[in-house]
Amino acid sequence: MLFAVIKSLLGRRASGAATEPRLDELSDEALMTRYAGGDQKAFTLLVTRHQGPLYNFILRSCRQPSLADELLQETFLRIVKSAASYSPDAKFTTWAYTIARNLCIDLARKHSRAHTLSLQKPLGDDEGATRQDILPDEQARSASVDHDRMVFRDRLDRALANLPEDQREVFILREISGLKFREIATMLDCPVPTIKSRMRYALQTLRGELADFASQSFDADEASEMLP
């Protein structure tokens, strides 16, 4: 009888004990806090969750895969360096994308002047010819069997590039990186209605620029590949 009572009490204690959530069930903020406390696996999971969306955001900002790779690494490096000062009250995605955005802005400032001079530099013995004159045109790229897809991607890239910077940034953060309007507002230090207004104007412009493709039919995989 005594053993039965003890066994019953032990069973109740075990069943009533709270089980610690699995690492992949924790929020980004909880993972960052764990990493700041020395849990390396928490940081690995954060990288797994966010490296894809962050890379897409950076790539659409700098438009060069090699630079996007470098900036992505630098973004996570800065996250590592700032781990000790991270506050769990701050949303991780907003914090991380702010770091990435600032890196992209710094890069654009450094390279805009150098890029312009490089394109205008004469090429060898071709008097008057510049690097800009020999950039591949749309006709040269259109021989692929994926012609329509290529043209769509080119048109979309040019349409995004021609958007005002504030509209393009909101569109990328919302549609490509998946941030909520309030997160974007916090990141850009703007009211939510302003962010929504920029998004609305961006969508209106893009619909007009891509109207020729309204009749195109793409499956889910193709559509995800073609979106920036």
Image (cartoon, rainbow, N blue to C red):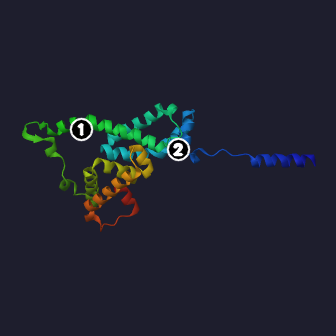
**Residue shown at the point (40%, 40%) measured from the top left:** 98
Q: Which of the marked residues, 1 or 2, is nearer the chain's N terminus?
A: 2
- In this picture, is 179 found above or below 67? below
Q: Categorize mark 1 by other alpha carbons within 10 Å: few (<14), some (14-19), many (20+).
A: few
Tell me where residue 175 appears, x and y as whole percent.
39, 54
Kind of residue at disc 1: Ser
Judging from the image, what secondary structure is the residue with disc 1 in? Answer: helix
Q: Residue furthest bottom?
A: 215
**Residue shown at the point (21%, 38%) measured from the top left:** 115
Tell me where residue 140 appears, x and y as whole percent.
19, 54
Kind of residue at disc 2: Asp
Q: Residue furthest right?
A: 1
Please say whether residue 19 is visible from this viewpoint: yes
Q: Is residue 210 left or right of residue 73?
A: left
Q: Is residue 128 left or right of residue 151?
A: left
Tell me where residue 215 appears, x and y as whole percent.
29, 68
Judging from the image, what secondary structure is the residue with disc 2 in? Answer: helix
Q: Residue furthest left?
A: 127
Nearer-the-camera pick, 183 or 69: 183
Residue 44 got which mark? Answer: none
Q: Is residue 24 left or right of residue 9?
A: left
Q: Categorize mark 2 by other alpha carbons within 10 Å: few (<14), some (14-19), many (20+).
A: many
Residue 28 got which mark? Answer: 2
Compute the Cα span from label 1 to label 2.
Answer: 35 Å
Tell me where residue 42 appears, x and y as whole percent.
55, 39
Per the image, the residue denoted by label 1 is 112
Nearer-the-camera pick, 123 or 38: 38
Name the image quarter holding residue 94. top left
* In contact (CB < 8 Å): disc 1 and disc 2: no
Question: Total number of numbered labels?
Answer: 2
**Residue shown at the point (18%, 56%) measured from the top left:** 139
Please say whether residue 178 is visible from this viewpoint: no
